């Protein structure tokens, strides 16, 4: 019931971008703009495609530092998100915030990356006060991730273990085209390893037995 496909796409799902490095600013308390810097062009395009599914247009622009900015215009339908995720200190996590698969999918698209021992959902390093409530929101989904400091490869929460990674992949849904390498990949179970086929002993009378075997686009946005 919490997977990304459990309900239709909604503007509120874009909160997942704010769980990561995304930022939102409002203008005159009537409109707001959502922006996020990402490392890969393919990630930027996949993210913009998810915005379009929610009827929100976003531009993808190259930056001088070699990264890509995904940015919306100032829009009235984003003001509610800005009000929930902003206070006097800047970006904040709304009280009682609960993650679902759709928001988690946007978080993974904005910043998620496979780690050596699991899958890392990075926090916003510029908003350290958001890290604890976001880790709690991940834990509430039953993923029980380990919080990593910047020195340990974070800041972020790392989901580990085959069962939890399978659950994470189910919550996120299928990977968009072009970013498969950025999606969680649960390790294979040792119990499922295939064993090579072995031919049976020849049948009596010189007749050989039979050997058993097995069979062994994303739309471009204007820059």
Image: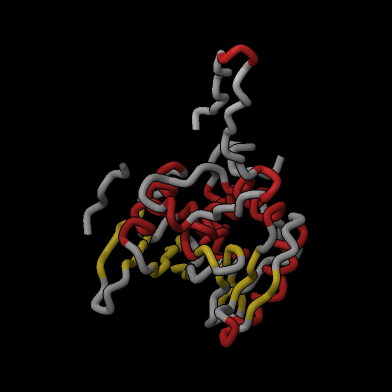
Q: In which quarter of the image is the N terminus?
A: top right
19 relative to 154, above or below: above
Is 47 rendered above or below residue 199? Answer: below
Q: In this view, does 136 lie above or below 189?
A: below
| Residue 132 visible in the snapshot | yes
Task: Tell me where residue 57 appears, x and y as whole percent.
Answer: 36, 50
Q: Which residue lies furthest to the bottom in this view?
A: 151
164 in relation to 146, above or below: above
Residue depicted at 58% across the width and 18% down the height? 209
Q: Nearer the viewer, residue 106 or 25?
A: 106
* Quadrant of the snapshot with the C terminus: bottom left
Specify whether 91 is left or right of 221. right
Query: What residue is drawn where x is 44% and y is 47%?
Result: 50
State the image coordinates of residue 22 (x, y, percent, origin top left): 48, 68
Does residue 89 appear in this view?
Answer: no
Q: Nearer the viewer, residue 124 or 92?
A: 124
Q: Position of residue 112 (x, y in %)?
A: 51, 63
Residue 78 lies, in percent from the top left, at: 49, 56
Compared across the picture, whether 100 is left or right of 80 comes to: right
Image check: 44 left or right of 21? Answer: left
Residue at 55% across / 69% down in the picture? Answer: 116
Query: Which residue lies at the image location 61% right of the left edge and 67% below the top edge?
Result: 117
Q: Which colour scheme is used?
A: secondary structure
């Amino acid at each position: 019931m919490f997977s990304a496909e459990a309900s239709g796409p909604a503007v509120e799902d874009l909160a997942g971008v704010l769980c990561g490095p995304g930022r939102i600013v409002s203008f005159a308390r009537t409109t707001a703009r959502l922006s996020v810097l990402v490392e890969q062009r393919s990630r930027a395009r996949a993210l913009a495609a998810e915005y379009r599914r929610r009827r929100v247009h976003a531009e993808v622009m190259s930056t001088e530092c070699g990264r890509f900015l995904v940015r919306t215009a100032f829009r009235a339908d984003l003001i509610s998100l800005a009000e929930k995720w902003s206070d006097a200190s800047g970006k904040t996590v709304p009280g009682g915030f609960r993650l679902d698969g759709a928001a988690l999918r946007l978080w993974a698209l904005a910043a998620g990356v496979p780690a050596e021992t699991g899958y890392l959902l990075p926090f916003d390093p510029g908003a350290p006060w958001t890290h604890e409530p976001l880790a709690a929101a991940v834990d509430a989904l039953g993923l029980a991730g380990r919080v990593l400091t910047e020195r340990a490869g974070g800041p972020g929460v790392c989901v580990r273990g085959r069962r939890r990674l399978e659950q994470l992949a189910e919550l996120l849904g299928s990977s968009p085209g072009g970013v498969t390498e950025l999606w969680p990949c649960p390790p294979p179970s040792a119990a499922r390893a295939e064993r090579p086929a072995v031919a049976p002993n020849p049948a009596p009378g010189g007749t050989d037995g039979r050997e058993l075997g097995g069979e062994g686009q994303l739309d471009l946005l204007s820059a």
